[in-house]
Image (cartoon, rainbow, N blue to C red):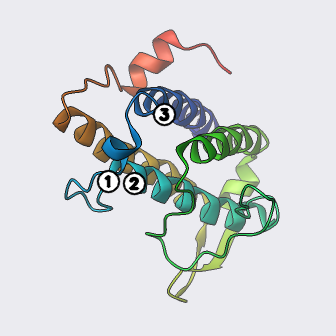
Amino acid sequence: MLLKHYEAMARYNHWMNAKLYGICGELSDEERKRDMGAFFGSIHRTLNHILLADHAWMRRFTADPEVFRFRDAHGEPIEIRSLDQEVYSDFGMLRSVRRKTDNQVQVWVEGLTEDDLSAPLRYKTSTGEEHEHPTWWAVSHFFNHQTHHRGQVTTLLKQQGIDPGVTDLAAMLRTAPPV
């Protein structure tokens, strides 16, 4: 059942990101980037953080740093220095990389096995701490982290008078067909 759960979470991730990026795409750059006192300041910086963390985890999960390396509009690698770094100031670029990443996450999850999830995952955090634990711990954290920060984005939207609509996993499972 854990594999089915992660497949549902990958679909939910894709569904919610498409929904939020659609709403945020209607905002002006100034509205998206306004510091509203959130953990990462603005909607834009929070969206950047989610994407940055997703790439960090996917590099760990896949051991393929090239696939999940950030690149600028010219294809040059972007050096990541911190988890609050603004990787893309251009919303169109951020949105494009988000879509691509969501598709890659779905493909990766569909290829997972029970053995993959129970295998040990060894990695270093951005501060250099070394960790080792079953992969399923990290996959659960990966999806929980996204949901947590998207919740912050929906709060920031509400503070601007924008209703993001239904955001429930169960609502997506009832209405959105598998992608």
Which numbered dot is residue 21?
3
Residue 151 left/right relative to 142: left
- Name the disc covering residue 88, or none: none
Badges 3 and 2: C-beta atoms under 8 Å apart? Answer: no
**Residue at position x 50%, y 77% in the image:** 82
Q: Circle 3: is it few (<14), some (14-19), or many (20+) Cα within 10 Å?
A: some
Q: Is 9 left, or right, of 63 in this rendering? A: left
Residue 85 percent location from the top left of the image: 48, 69
The residue at which mark 1 appears reads as 42
Q: Is residue 1 above or below residue 69?
A: above
Amino acid carrying mark 1 in the image: Ser
Residue for point 48% across, 33% down: 21
User: Is 136 on the left-hand or right-hand side of 44?
Assistant: right
What residue sits right under mark 2 in the picture?
Answer: 46
Mark 3 and mark 1 lie on one chain; the one further toward the N terminus is 3
Q: Is residue 59 left or right of residue 33?
A: right
Estimate the spatial distance between the alpha carbons at disc 2 and disc 1, rounded to whole Å: 6 Å
Quadrant (top left, top right, bottom left, bottom right) of the N terminus: top right
Q: Label 3 vs label 2: CA separation? A: 12 Å
Nearer to the camera, 35 or 176: 35
Asked whether the viewer can see residue 148, the reply is no
For the point 63% across and 60% down, which residue is it? 55
Callout 3 amino acid? Tyr
Outermost residue toward the top? 175
Determine contact: label 2, label 1, CB under 8 Å. Answer: yes
Q: Position of residue 48 (x, y in %)?
A: 49, 55
Residue 135 position by quadrant: bottom right
Q: Secondary structure at mark 1?
A: loop
